[in-house]
Structures are given as C-alpha cells and as structure tokens.
Image (tube, rainbow, N blue to C red):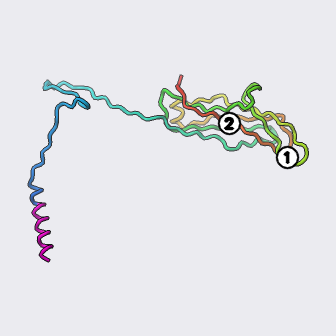
Amino acid sequence: MNKNKILTAVMAGTMMMGSALPVCAATTDYDPISQTEVGEDGTSRDTEVLYTRASSYSVVIPKTIVLDAVSKDSDYAVRVYGDISSDKKVTVAPQDALTDIEGINFYMIDQATAGTKKANVQADVTQDVVDWTSAEVTADTSKDGNVAAPTITAGNWKGTFNFNIALADAE
C-alpha cells in the first residue's frame, strides 16, 4: 500500500512541476538549405512550391466482341481514365496482326472440330482516334472502334487482336 502512495505522490509532483516549467522555442533566420535570409527592411520574398507525381491511368478495353449475325460487324469502346501530365498522352491502338495486308486486321478461325474446317476469314479493325490527352483522361472519355468480317459464313469463329497501350510525349 505504501508503494501506491509513494508512486501517486511522485506522479502528482511531476505533473505540478511540468505545468510550471516554461517552454522555450528558438527560430533561426537563415537555413542555407531550405530558407532565404530576409533583412530587417521588411521586403518580401517569393517561395516556390513544388509537386511531382508520375502519370497514373487505367485503360478499359473489351474482353469479348460479338459480331452481329446479319451485319457481321460490331462496335466497341475503349476508355481511359486517371491523371496524366499535360505534356503526355495515352495511346491505345489496335495492333495489326497481318502486317502484309493493308489496314488493321486479323484472322477469324473456324472452330469446327469435325469435318473440314473453313478457310480463315479476314476481319478488319477501325479505330480512328487512338490518343487521349490529359483533359480527356480526366474527363473519363471513351473512343469507339469497329470490327468487321464481311465475308464470314455460318459456323463458330474466333479471332484475337491486341491493343498497344503506351504513355508518350504529347505533340
């Protein structure tokens, strides 16, 4: 019990002394690394504020595009959102799988498992606009494209094309 009384008295004494001790703070007029010396003449000085952050963005591309049974084509949308520097642009462009044929294109392949498979059919991709500026990325805009395979016939067909995605210097 004596032990508790002694500890209580020590704590009370410490609290009383702590509230009576003055607190002193010092400032320096000149720090060569982060401050500018200012004279007593009251002139003002500029302070530069800096912020650096790398561009951050996300791209949403369709996982599957289903061609219409009658028109044999389909529209799709690519969306880019986030925050990019004003001197940059995000490019999302369909990649040409058949470089020896003009345009952006790839083959649709017959998925039949029995019998004779039909010959591959060329599908064409059009996406006129492939660049997003910093304003467009902030506004969360999408840009449309189209896939068409006008010579495709009845059956199960599958094809794949890729998108090239890059952050590049704005022009």
Where does residue 53 sit, x and y in percent of width and height? 43, 35
- Secondary structure of residue under mark 1: loop
How packed mark 2 is, by other alpha carbons closer than 10 Å (few <14, some 14-19, many 20 or more), is: few
Which quarter of the figure has residue 34? Answer: top left
Q: Amino acid at mark 1?
A: Ala
Front in this rendered view, residue 130 or 12: 12
Q: For the N terminus, which image quadrant?
A: bottom left
Task: Name the magenta segment's main secondary structure.
Answer: helix
Q: For the C terminus, which image quadrant?
A: top right
Where does residue 14 sit, x and y in percent of width and height? 12, 61
Judge from the rendering whether residue 83 lies leftward or rightward of residue 109; answer left or right.
left
| Mark 1 vs mark 2, CA separation in Å | 24 Å
Residue at mark 2: 162
- Secondary structure of residue under mark 2: loop
Magenta region, residue range: 1-15
**Which residue lies at the image location 47% right of the left edge and 31% below the top edge?**
85
Where does residue 127 sit, x and y in percent of width and height? 67, 31
Question: Magenta segment: does it hold 14?
Answer: yes
Residue 20, numbered label:
none
How packed mark 1 is, by other alpha carbons closer than 10 Å (few <14, some 14-19, many 20 or more), is: few
Which residue ends up furthest to the right in the rendered image?
115
Where does residue 2 sit, x and y in percent of width and height? 12, 75
**Residues marked 1 and 2 touching at CB (< 8 Å):** no
Which quarter of the figure has residue 133? Answer: top right
Front in this rendered view, residue 7 or 146: 7
Q: Earlier in the sequence, mark 1 or mark 2?
A: 1
Question: Magenta segment: does it hold 34?
Answer: no
Residue at mark 1: 112
